[in-house]
Image (cartoon, rainbow, N blue to C red):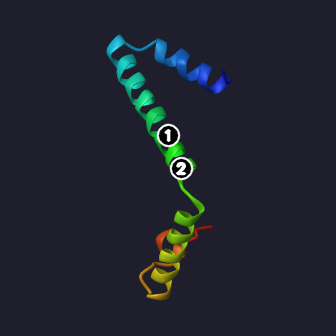
Amino acid sequence: MTKLLQQAIAQIKQLPSDQQDAIAARFLAELEDEQKWENRFAATTDAQWDQMAAMVRQEIANGETIPLNEVFPFQK
């Protein structure tokens, strides 16, 4: 277990039981969601990746995208 996780658990232990359960439920849901994404990515075939890339290229060619710097302007 990492030190950061140990710190988080130590702080959670100090909370009332209902808050501990709420945090635990969110944490377990996050782990489940992460596992689902990992499974979906692992099951994606090269042909599916190629199809998605072709779709993105077509959207770019059609002008259906927004430049990344407009979505996330660079700030100094």
Q: Say which element carries label 2.
A: helix
Coordinates of residue 68 in the picture (x, y in percent): 53, 73
Give the amino acid at mark 1.
Answer: Glu
In the displayed structure, does residue 2 sit left or right of residue 12?
A: right
Of 74 and 6, the residue lying toward us: 6
Q: Residue furthest bottom?
A: 62
Is 13 drawn above or below residue 26 in the view shown? above
Of residues 15 and 59, the one drawn nearer to the viewer in this rendering = 59
Which amino acid type is shown beneath numbered disc 2?
A: Ala
Residue 64 is situated, as x and y percent measured from the top left of the image, at 41, 82
Quarter of the image for residue 10 reads: top right
Q: Quadrant of the C terminus?
A: bottom right
Residue placed at 42% from the left, 22% from the top?
24
Number of marks drawn: 2
Q: Identify the residue at horizontal 49%, vertical 48% (top origin).
A: 40
On the rendered image, what quadrant is the N terminus found in?
A: top right
Residue that numbered label 2 is attached to? 43
Q: Is residue 9 above or below residue 54?
A: above
First in sequence: mark 2 vs mark 1: 1
Which residue position holds label 1? 34
